[in-house]
């Protein structure tokens, strides 16, 4: 089992990286969080990995944190969720956004994940409701922190649409708003959610996540 790699980044192509570890080049398909760190070729990079062995291939999937990898491992235990879909879920929804979606039975949030259609999202929602405690525990997130009233549904969607209209990526909008809702102690208006989300994005120093495309 290869659980972690630390070496020199040789190449980035989409979500695939090539990392040199003591003269051996490892090809790793990474979550969006790794790319959002803004790594450049030639610099040292550490990724937490999950190794998959198939009859026709040996694959490495990489993550920015161990908690993220543990959440991925929880995803692929779900019936019908393979490594590719698990990686897409990780790249699109963090644990807070996932918990909020499941608590509010927000299937539409799952359909924003690449490769997840409505029927798949509905099936995933059923599976996730049965495993949300396990998944959020793997990611180190308390469900009490992310317990959000269904009254947030409309405001959340409107706030996400507003951020997307401003040029932010849908995944970044969802993640940032999930953080805002998790920290909130009461109901927020759409304007308040957007304002706090923009303040949160502005405070992310040294990161490219959430920047307008």
Image: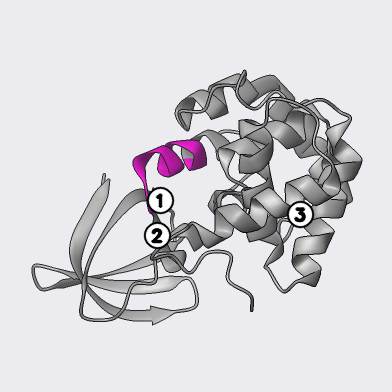
Residue located at (51% from left, 28% from top): 141
Q: Is residue 136 left or right of residue 17?
A: right
* Gap between marks 2 and 1 measured at Cα: 5 Å
Return the disc, 2 or 1, that comes first in the chain's sequence. Answer: 1
Residue found at the very far left of the displayed protein: 22
Residue 95 in the image: state x and y as whole percent.
57, 37
Part of the protein shown in magenta: 64-72
Residue 124: give its label: none
How would you rate the neighbour count of disc 1 (Cα within 10 Å): few for under 14, some for 14-19, many for 20 or more? few
How would you rate the neighbour count of disc 2 (Cα within 10 Å): few for under 14, some for 14-19, many for 20 or more? some
Residue 116: give its label: 3
User: Mark 2 — residue?
Assistant: 59
Return the disc, 1 or 3, that comes first in the chain's sequence. Answer: 1
68 inside magenta stretch? yes
Residue 15 in the image: state x and y as whole percent.
48, 71
Residue 209 in the image: state x and y as whole percent.
52, 64
User: Mark 1 — residue?
Assistant: 52
């Amino acid at each position: 089992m290869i659980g972690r790699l630390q070496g020199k980044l040789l190449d980035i192509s989409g979500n695939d990286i090539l990392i040199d570890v003591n003269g051996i080049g490892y090809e790793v398909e990474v979550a969006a969080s790794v790319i959002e760190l803004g790594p450049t070729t030639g610099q040292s990079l550490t990724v937490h990995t999950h190794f998959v062995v198939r009859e026709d291939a040996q694959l490495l999937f990489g993550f920015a944190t161990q908690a993220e990898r543990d959440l991925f491992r929880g995803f692929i235990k779900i019936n019908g969720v393979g490594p590719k879909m698990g990686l897409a879920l990780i790249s699109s929804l963090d644990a807070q956004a996932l918990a909020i979606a499941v608590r509010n039975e927000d299937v539409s949030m799952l359909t924003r994940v690449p490769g997840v259609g409505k029927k798949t999202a509905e099936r995933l929602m059923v599976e996730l409701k049965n495993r949300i405690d396990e998944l959020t525990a793997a990611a180190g997130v308390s469900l009490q922190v992310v317990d959000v009233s269904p009254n947030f549904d409309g405001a959340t969607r409107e706030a996400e649409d507003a951020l997307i209209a401003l040029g932010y990526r849908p995944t970044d909008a969802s993640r940032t708003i999930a953080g805002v809702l998790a920290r909130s102690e009461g109901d927020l208006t759409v304007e308040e959610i957007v304002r706090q989300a923009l303040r949160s994005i502005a405070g992310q120093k040294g990161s490219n996540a959430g920047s307008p495309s």
